[in-house]
């Protein structure tokens, strides 16, 4: 309970045991009774009983008593009868319970943590006295958290065991250091940062794109070379010497003692930047009529995306999907807007490239995060949760700076729940998410099932790992679904172009595209029904029903129309951004219209 | 839903907003709030201390209001606890007021709540919400 006047501290002192000592008594019961002692008997008994039932600390009880006494005195001064005031008071025990709950919530961390400690110590002492020893053993003999497995060392050993000629890592690192980033104040910077496959090829934009590509010629050569390697072979940061350029090191910190949680993944951001450069170069190649080079860059982009998933975190999978999403969006757009650049062989190449199912990427990423969760729990969380409160708090603060001062409440709840219960809940969610990620999207009517807030039993923050590591599982699974449908978009775009070349018109039915690389007509990810054709206009529209599962004739949703691949950030969901519009369909073809930058 | 339950639910939603509203003008102590709630809402939102004080402690715990103790003057008497609105509470009051206004507008559109003079036209309720 917080008073904020300058004399509040003195008030508190006045109700502490120190005051009792000065007065020569060891109990402060009279401090609590004093505020009510001048009330009429019935009111005094009601106030005392209510205050007693709060089971609050002495200081807190004294304050509640003072406030209630003041209330009754005011009522009496207003001419009210004690019986009337008692009737108006209502349910005393219920009020006491609610007051206690609110006041306890306001206690600072130190008070609450000490409370737990005192509680645990008290029980342990009782255990000694009673000779049971069980709880004493758990507290006195429990060792600080330790993880017997060094996953970082395992990961790096596997990478280093690869033949150097198979590893892309060294080439990528060299490329990342060679990337030429325009100054933030430079007009080029926005296009470098926000490359968009739907951008029109107006002269000004084209000039900027060419300049950026030219400046990054060396880096792109290294990236293309790296992308041709069979394995990523990444090294998780354990020492500064892992990085070639000492100047790069200031931005990143080495991991301590192989803890997965402390590892930063500084390569993911330049990987995305590299992906944008490859997409930009593919765009320029298509404008210049060189479809083969454009296809090659999209292939490199796809390989870069596959490499990004090869690390021990789900975030790698998300970046992988983002990179590949940029590839599919760029390919669809270029095939539609610059068809003359591509031969039939190039178009078939696009169809072959995007035949694979990306949903396994999500499932793998979730499995990687399971390991990260276990490693982190074992390092920060002893079995009885008593040892690492300060470190635990720091961890929570690092993970969720937004929760600020209330972190103490979460830490306390998590300690109360215990490590094993936390890990069990976390792993249960991983299993659930993996199961959904591998299902057909239309068999998953709602991803709300993956919202921990809705399903964790008991207070959500007891399961701290679930709530800090897992809040985006629903988005992750949705992103995998979206990536899966985007690959259909490219295959359809290529088939439509091949058909039009053969027949001199656009295809109007699914079966017309069967001989052109679409033997099995794709399904709508939202409903499982075949994708629909709207042939009302000369250019048909191929679409799914979108998030609202309502047929709106192939009208693109506003959210979808506004979405650009460059908008994507790991914290957002491609699925959300592209399809969660309140209205509109999910249009697979034609791609987004071109627009000026 | 029985009438008593409805009353509790309504009070649970309206009570905190009413308290925040009263505190938006000036700081008040518990008894003052009880009287003001009873008088200014014609008894509709009158609440006993067993409801009001837990609510005040809860609002304080949420950081929506703050409390300060005022010691008695030289003439004696009892210390008194005053409550006032925090910045967060003021923001919450704005949000809550807006929501209540929208609810009233919606109910008005359905003819459940009387329209104020000069606003006889009922609101239209569409697929996407209420159009005033």
Image (cartoon, rainbow, N blue to C red):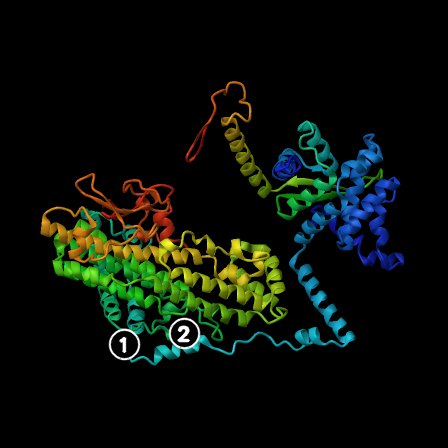
Would residue B52 appear left or right of A162 to someone viewing this image? Answer: right
Identify the disc placed on residue A166: 1
Dividing the picture into quarters, in which one does residue B114 lie?
A: top right
Q: Answer yes or no: is residue A547 visible.
A: yes
Between marks 1 and 2, how big is the CA–CA gap? 23 Å
Dividing the picture into quarters, in which one does residue A361 lie?
A: bottom left
- What chain does badge 1 belong to? A
Between disc 1 and disc 2, the foreground one is: 1
Identify the disc placed on residue A452: none
Would residue B68 appear left or right of A265 to someone viewing this image? Answer: right
Q: Residue at x 58, y 43 (%)?
A: B88
Locate residue A537, reporting x and y percent: 19, 39
Which of pointers 1 and 2 lies earlier in the amino acid sequence? 1
Locate residue A86, reporting x and y percent: 81, 38
Badge 1 local density, few (<14 within 10 Å), some, or many (20+)?
some
Q: Residue at x 37, y 44 (%)?
A: A548
Residue annotated with mark 2? A240
Note whether A587 is above or below A359 in the view shown: above
Q: Residue at x 53, y 33 (%)?
A: B103
Toward the viewer: A5 or A582? A582
């Amino acid at each position: 309970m917080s008073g904020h006047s300058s004399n509040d501290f003195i008030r508190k002192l006045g109700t502490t045991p120190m005051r009792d000592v000065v007065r020569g008594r060891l109990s402060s019961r009279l401090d609590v009774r004093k505020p009510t002692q001048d009330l009429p008997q019935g009111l005094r008994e009601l106030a005392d009983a209510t205050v007693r039932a709060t089971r609050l600390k002495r200081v807190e009880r004294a304050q509640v008593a003072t406030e209630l006494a003041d209330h009754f005195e005011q009522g009496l001064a207003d001419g009210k009868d004690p019986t009337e005031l008692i009737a108006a008071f209502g349910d005393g025990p219920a009020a006491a319970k609610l007051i206690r709950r609110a006041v306890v919530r306001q206690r600072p961390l130190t008070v609450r943590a000490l409370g737990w400690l005192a509680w645990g110590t008290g029980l342990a002492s009782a255990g000694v006295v009673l000779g049971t020893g069980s709880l004493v053993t758990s507290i006195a003999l429990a060792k600080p958290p330790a993880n017997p497995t060094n996953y970082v060392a395992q990961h790096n050993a596997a990478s280093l065991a690869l033949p150097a000629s198979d590893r892309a890592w060294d080439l990528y690192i060299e490329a990342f250091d060679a990337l030429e980033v325009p100054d933030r104040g430079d007009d080029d910077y926005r296009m470098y940062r926000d490359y968009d496959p739907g951008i029109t090829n107006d002269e000004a934009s084209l000039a900027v794109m060419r300049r950026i590509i030219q400046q990054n010629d060396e880096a792109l050569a290294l990236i293309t070379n790296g992308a041709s390697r069979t394995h990523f072979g990444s090294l998780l940061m354990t020492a500064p010497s892992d990085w070639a350029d000492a100047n790069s090191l200031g931005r990143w910190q080495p991991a301590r003692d192989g803890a997965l949680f402390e590892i930063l993944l500084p390569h993911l951001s330049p990987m995305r930047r590299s992906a944008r450069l490859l997409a930009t170069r593919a765009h320029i190649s298509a404008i210049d009529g060189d479809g083969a080079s454009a296809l090659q860059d999209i292939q490199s982009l796809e390989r870069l995306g596959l490499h990004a998933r090869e690390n021990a975190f789900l975030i790698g999978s998300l970046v992988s999907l983002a990179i590949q999403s940029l590839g599919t969006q760029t390919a669809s757009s270029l095939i539609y807007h610059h068809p003359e650049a591509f031969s039939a062989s190039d178009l078939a190449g696009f169809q072959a490239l995007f035949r694979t199912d990306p949903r396994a990427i999500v499932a793998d990423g979730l499995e990687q995060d399971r390991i990260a969760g276990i490693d982190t729990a074992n390092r920060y969380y002893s079995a009885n949760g008593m040892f690492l409160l300060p470190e635990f708090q720091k961890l929570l603060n690092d993970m969720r700076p937004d929760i600020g001062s209330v972190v103490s409440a979460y830490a306390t709840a998590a300690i109360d729940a215990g490590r094993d219960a936390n890990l069990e809940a976390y792993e249960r969610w991983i299993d659930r998410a993996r199961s959904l990620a591998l299902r057909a999207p239309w068999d998953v009517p709602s991803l709300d099932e993956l919202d921990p807030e809705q399903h964790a039993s008991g207070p959500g923050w007891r399961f701290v790992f679930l709530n800090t590591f897992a809040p985006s599982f629903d988005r992750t699974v949705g992103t995998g679904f979206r990536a899966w449908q985007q690959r259909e978009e490219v295959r359809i775009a290529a088939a439509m172009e091949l058909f039009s070349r053969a027949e001199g018109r656009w295809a109007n039915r699914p079966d017309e595209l069967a001989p052109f690389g679409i033997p099995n007509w794709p399904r709508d990810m939202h409903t499982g029904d075949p994708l629909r054709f709207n042939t009302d206009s000369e250019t048909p529209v191929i679409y799914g029903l979108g998030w609202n599962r309502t047929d709106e004739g192939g009208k693109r949703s506003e959210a979808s129309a506004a979405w650009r691949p460059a908008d994507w950030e790991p914290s957002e969901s491609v699925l959300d951004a592209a399809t969660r519009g309140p209205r509109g369909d999910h249009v697979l073809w034609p791609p987004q219209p071109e627009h000026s930058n | 839903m029985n009438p008593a339950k409805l009353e509790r639910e309504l009070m649970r939603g309206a009570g905190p907003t009413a308290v925040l509203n009263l505190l938006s003008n000036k700081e008040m102590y518990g008894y003052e709030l009880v009287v003001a709630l009873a008088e200014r809402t014609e008894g509709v939102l009158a609440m006993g201390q067993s409801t009001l004080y837990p609510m005040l402690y809860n609002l304080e715990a949420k950081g929506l209001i703050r409390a300060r103790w005022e010691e008695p003057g030289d003439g004696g008497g009892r210390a008194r606890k005053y409550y006032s609105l925090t910045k967060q509470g003021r923001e919450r009051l704005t949000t809550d007021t807006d929501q209540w206004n929208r609810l009233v507008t919606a109910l008005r559109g359905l003819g459940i709540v009387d329209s104020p003079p000069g606003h006889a036209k009922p609101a239209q309720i569409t697929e996407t919400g209420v159009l005033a």
